[in-house]
Image: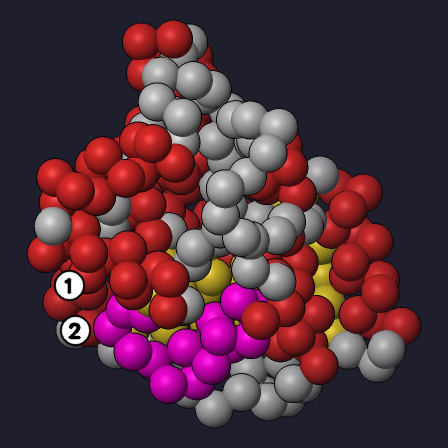
Amino acid sequence: MKLGSSTVVAITGASSGIGQELAFQLAARGCAVALGARRRDRIEANAEAIRKKGGRAIAVPTDVSVRGEVERFFRRAAEEFGRLDIAVHNAGISPAKGTLLENDEADVRRTFDVNVMGCVYGIWGAAPVMEKNGGGVMVFVSSIVGKRGVPLASAYCASKFAVQGLTESVRPELEKKNIRVVTVCPPGVDTEFFKANARRDTRRFRLHPVGRIARDIVRACEREPREVLLTMDAKLLRWMSALAPRFMDRAIARAKGV
């Protein structure tokens, strides 16, 4: 899709991290952006920063685990800017710490409510709005651990595997409505998400700059590939896991200290 002043983008999880950076970069390309997240103060500050630079932005407090709020978010974007071209389903959490046997049920359920049902509600909310302007693009921010699970993040990995299955399933369904589905699989990204969800004091793999990852996602919005693994280390992890799964089981467990 061509990005510019006629393009309207709605982004969930836009209070920080990838979602915030995407909003800034897309606004810099001339797109109108709607920012959705639970933290009202953060998205309002981000929207104001965009407007101060001459961009167009609105902030809509949104909890993606509540269907009505998600539907309202996408309707509000179209009401404000006249259409909806791109929906970025980016909101995600990982509150469950430790092994699955150590996890609280509430944390596991909350992970699925946000990471999986948030995407389901996003499809239900955005698709009817997009249909009114002849179609659009849905971008789902999954994760490389939706391709290859890792220890000490069972609930998060399982939720991202679910997103992978969801996007593969709805892609042909939405194609009939001229809604194209793009799944992006980032590696570890240097954002508040990893600081808030750290499982240990030191990290044994490097985190990628959020600006670079956001640029790759913006490029995916333009080129509309079916799926993108955003970095070489993410691609290597997938390839090695396919070629030598037992070796990778042991290597990843050792790296995670299990």
Relative vertical location of residue 7 with respect to residue 151 in this rendering, above or below: below
Side (left or right) of 174 relative to 139: left
Q: Is residue 224 magenta?
A: yes
Residue 234 screen position, x and y as percent: 35, 60
Relative vertical location of residue 12 with respect to residue 222 in this rendering, above or below: above
Q: Residues within 10 Å of mark 2 (few under 14, many from 20)?
A: few
Res. 176 mark: 2
Q: Main secondary structure of the magenta part?
A: helix
Side (left or right) of 210 relative to 28: left
The quarter of the picture where residue 28 lies is bottom right
Residue 218 screen position, x and y as percent: 51, 76
**Which residue is at 21% across, 43% downward?**
248
Res. 173 mark: 1
The quarter of the picture where residue 26 lies is bottom right
Q: Which residues are magenta?
A: 213-228
Q: Are marks 2 and 1 in contact (CB under 8 Å)?
A: yes
Whether residue 216 is visible here, answered yes or no, is yes
Q: Residues within 10 Å of mark 1 (few under 14, many from 20)?
A: some
The answer to which of 19 and 66 lies nearer the viewer is 19
Q: Is residue 124 magenta?
A: no
Dot 1 falls on a residue whose secondary structure is helix
Quadrant the N terminus occupies: bottom left
Q: Gap in Å between the C-alphas at discs 2 and 1? A: 6 Å
Relative vertical location of residue 103 with respect to residue 209 in this rendering, above or below: above
**Which residue is at 83% across, 54% downward?**
45
Total tally of numbered discs in the picture: 2
Residue 27 screen position, x and y as percent: 68, 76
User: Mark 1 is on which residue type?
Assistant: Glu
